Image (cartoon, grey):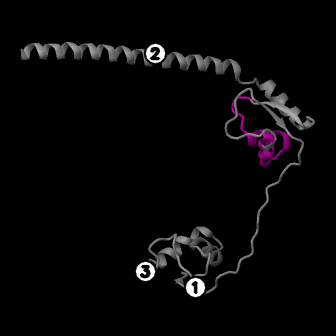
Amino acid sequence: MSNTITERLKNSEQTISFILGILVVLVVGSLIFRYFTQRSEMTQVGEVPSSEQTASDEALAGETALPYKYTVQTGDHLWAIAERYYDSGYNWTDIAQANELVNPNGLAVGQELIIPDVQAKEATVLLVEVDSIEGSNYIVKEGDSLSKIALRAYSDIYEWEKIYEANLDKISNPSIIYPGQELTIPR
């Protein structure tokens, strides 16, 4: 009797293995088929423009009256498109707003974008005047952090580690300092 149960289990185990093997082959086959069909569709829709076409597009970009409809090409991103039409990548936000893009990183080949008529933006540097720390000791104030103290002491926020290492006996976590705490500022 025990032999028949064992034989039945072996037979059913072989059947289950056979069925699972067929399922794996079918799933892998459908994934491969899907990959190649999507790839051929992408090649047809988003063919790489010829160098002549790209050169003519770039020549037109400087001369094109805005607003303008632009068709996204393979490899495009908003920064590059903004540079093409405004000579400033910072205008990518204007393009994103004009097209109500939820995900500015999710451009699709063939997608049409409106290039709005706006002024070109320039990079600006915000200079903030801060009181420098001259001495070798400093008492922490409300809102201070090691990087803010480093900026005032060394004019470089990345020097916060110097302050942290000099105060290991007072600071257990570099992200947590307290008002009234006296710190050594190494010179």
Q: Is residue 66 left or right of residue 168?
A: right
Mark 2: few, some, or many residues within 10 Å (few <14, many ≥20)?
A: few
**Residue 186 located left or right of residue 52:** left
- Say if the magenta span includes residue 93: yes
Using the image, tell me which numbered label, if any, was put on residue 139.
1
Q: Quadrant of the C terminus?
A: bottom right
* Residue in front for this viewpoint, 66 or 143: 143
At label 1, counting other C-alpha atoms closer than 10 Å, the crowd grade (few under 14, some 14-19, many 20 or more) is few
Look at the image and give the residue range highlighted in magenta: 73-96
Q: Residue at x 60, y 74 (%)?
A: 150
Residue that carries the numbered disc 3 in the rendered image: 169
Q: Which residue is mark 2?
A: 29
Q: Amino acid at mark 1?
A: Ile
Q: Residue at x 44, y 77 (%)?
A: 168
Alpha carbon of mark 3 to alpha carbon of mark 2: how far? 63 Å
* Label 2: element kind: helix
The quarter of the picture where residue 26 lies is: top left
Q: Secondary structure at mark 3?
A: loop
In 3D space, how far apart are the residues under numbered discs 3 and 1 (Cα atoms)?
A: 15 Å
Sequence-wise, the earlier of marks 1 and 2 is: 2
Residue drawn at x 62%, y 73% as measured from the top left: 148
Residue 20 percent across, percent down from the top left? 33, 18
Circle 1 — which element? strand
Residue density around tag 3, few if under 14, some if 14–19, many if 20 or more, within 10 Å? few
| Image quadrant where residue 132 sits | bottom right
Q: Measuring from the top left, give residue 185's x and y in whole percent.
A: 55, 81
